[in-house]
Amino acid sequence: MENPLHLKSVNHISLVCRSVERSIDFYQNVLGFFPIRRPGSFAFDGAWLFNYGMGIHLLKSEDPDNMPKISHINPKDNHISFQCESMAIVERKLREMEIEYVKNRVEEGGIYVDQLFFHDPDGSMIEICNCDVLPVIPLAGSCSSVNCNFHQQQQIPSAVQM
């Protein structure tokens, strides 16, 4: 496969938040991220967190009162997804923490992928899944928003992390 920009990995995502402290609490105590040092030269409030090989950069909103209100949980909305070891444990913990979530199951060729969707304090969507049970199968050919020509090239073992 081509890598025209010679990319190595995902480094971080940035999330604008109403309250940096509230978001730190969520990402630490719900998702297991830990704070890391952030350059002191930034002239705005924020925090950096890290785990699972990636960072989350929290940015204090310049106008928190005008940030979009949290809406219903829509699994088809923009989201970040994390794989887990046990869906049952995740669901139990979300119930214990009184975090509202939507549960979904996808079936593909006899393989079942379970998903839980919920929001962070500012409405950013989080998915927890067992997506690693689904094999990663590269497509040969072209794909556009209008038409996809799906031709399986080769199957990559499910041990490949998405």
Image: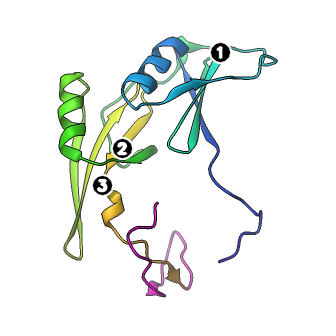
Disc 2 crowd, CA 10 A, few/some/many (<14, 14-19, 20+) = some
3D distance between C-alphas at marks 2 and 1: 27 Å
Where does the image place residue 89, in percent across and percent down from the top left? 21, 39
Element on which disc 2 rests:
strand
Residue 23 % position (x, y): 48, 20
State which mark lies toward you, 2 or 1: 2
Under tag 3, what secondary structure?
Answer: loop
Q: Which residue is at the front of the view, 143 or 45?
A: 45
Q: In which quarter of the view is residue 156 placed?
A: bottom left
Q: Earlier in the sequence, mark 2 or mark 1?
A: 1
- What residue is shown at x 24% (from left), y 30% (from top)? 94
Q: CA distance from mark 3 to mark 1?
A: 36 Å
Magenta-colored span:
141-162
Q: Secondary structure at mark 1?
A: loop
Is residue 53 among what the camera can see? yes
> Residue at horizontal 48%, vertical 24%?
68
Q: Earlier in the sequence, mark 3 or mark 1?
A: 1
Q: In the image, which disc is placed on residue 130?
A: 3
According to the picture, the residue beneath numbered tag 1 turns out to be: 62
Kind of residue at disc 3: Asn
Query: Is 84 or 59 nearer to us in this picture?
Result: 84
Q: Is residue 19 visible?
A: no
Of badges 2 and 3, nearer the viewer stands 3
Query: How far is mark 2 from mark 3, CA to CA?
Result: 10 Å
Query: Mark 1: which amino acid?
Result: Glu
Amino acid under label 2?
A: Glu
Residue on which the image places disc 2: 127
